[in-house]
Image (cartoon, helix red, strand yellow):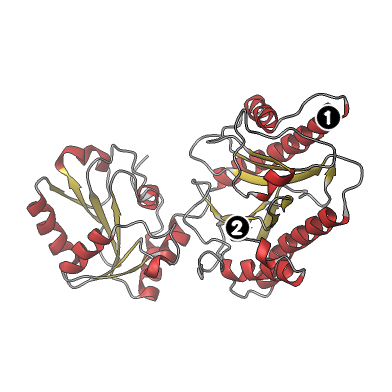
Amino acid sequence: MTLLENFDFPALRDLLGKIGADGWLLYDFHGINPSATRVLGINGMGTRRFFVLLPREGKPIAVAHRIELASFEGFPGDVRPYAAWPELHERLRALVAGKTVAMEVSPADAVPYLDRVPHGVIELIEGFGAKVISSGTLITRFAARWSASELAGHRRAAEAIARIAQDTLRWAGEELARGAEVRETTVQARVLEAFARASLVTDHGPIVGFQANAANPHYEPRAGSDRSLAAGDVLLLDLWAGVAAGTVFADQTWMGFAGQEPGEDVRRAWCVVRDARDAAVALLRDRWKKQEPVTGANLDDAARGVIRAAGYGDFFVHRTGHSIDRDLHGSGPHLDNFETADERALIPGVGFSVEPGVYLTGRFGVRSEINVYLGESGPEVTPKEPQQDLLLV
């Protein structure tokens, strides 16, 4: 693959003009800035610092260590090698002095997934007479959007894991009904076996939480301390997978109840969470139809408003959703006006989760998670048939 292959330089020049930057200065060291390597298409060792300036005018310029120049073969611009640090500083000074450059920084660390460049590097660049501004808009446009093949893979994974989730929850109920012990780790192992049969890959086992453990959003079952399923338990299953490593995963949460009729408290919590999920999607569809801008913070407010109105505001303790790109928690806009204030606009080509929850510590927790891809023709929800009612297992 050629570096910067199919990169939309006219669109970059337009955006750089809008944000008042002379160029986009990409930096990486040991993979701390995955957006840089994604944009550039670099697949090298990455054990030395590199800087690449994508200017508003002229050809790209790379500053790379002499022992890692192989990573820049085919670079469509000027490669300026360095070895000793004075040589690096000389190259950088000539590159950025007097310019305004966009880098992966977030003022006051407002969006940590965007804040990738160390403070010392910013000091270095500004010390050479440059002004550094945030590249948030550029990240959304050039690093967070899905390719056609990534969308196709995501769709296949989304439908597969929806089937796996429902089948697994029903299996757990059947096992309980016949008197077998069903542990959280057993359910987790069954999901991983189903992934293998479906030729899906994941980077971690799913979250499986019964009853009180479901009230911990990032609960991780462990053999020997995990819970056994009992009649009347709430079941939470959060699972994610993709068709290959390094592509766009699907990420969903499904809820079950071990019995024929959940109590009013469980049913009400479920309905509120489901309605909050749907409120975020409804606002996105409405803004899209009206061709009005919308941010991840707007959608977080919409979902959170439903939960607050129902009296559960204090029990929704995380953002409504996260960006999804080649990282499950990506660098694009998040549905967040709670943990952070993500005011980046949602644009065609980006994808994200929508996953409000209510967590009643010591009792039970409820979460519903779907994914949304914002296509040229509007929002697309995956899976095609999101969960509407608790699975009575």
Q: Is residue 295 visible in the rendered structure shown here?
A: no
Report the amino acid beneath label 1. Answer: Leu
Q: Earlier in the sequence, mark 2 or mark 1?
A: 1
* Left or right of residue 232: residue 243: left
Q: Residues within 10 Å of mark 1 (few under 14, many from 20)?
A: some
Q: Residues within 10 Å of mark 2 (few under 14, many from 20)?
A: many
Mark 1 and mark 2 in contact (Cβ < 8 Å)? no
Height in image: 286 above or below 233?
below
Question: Residue 14: where, in percent of width, then height?
Answer: 39, 70
Instruction: Provide the secondary structure element on which disc 1 rests.
Output: helix
* Left or right of residue 318: residue 341: left
Q: Give the Cα distance between marks 2 and 1.
A: 33 Å
Q: Which residue is mark 2?
A: 321
Q: Which mark is residue 61?
A: none
Which quadrant holds the N terminus?
top left
Query: Which residue is at a point 55% across and 57% down the rendered structure image?
Result: 350
Direction right: furthest residue: 260
Question: Residue 158: where, in percent of width, then height?
Answer: 67, 42
Question: Residue 184: where, in percent of width, then height?
Answer: 69, 33
Query: Which residue is at a point 66% across and 69% down the rendered structure image?
Result: 288
Q: Quadrant for residue 359, please give it.
A: bottom right
Q: Which mark is residue 176?
A: 1
Q: Nearer the viewer, residue 85 or 153?
A: 85
Marks 2 and 1: which is nearer the front? 1
Report the amino acid beneath label 2. Answer: Gly
Instruction: Provide the secondary structure element on which disc 2 rests.
Output: loop
Question: Residue 294: where, in percent of width, then height?
Answer: 59, 71
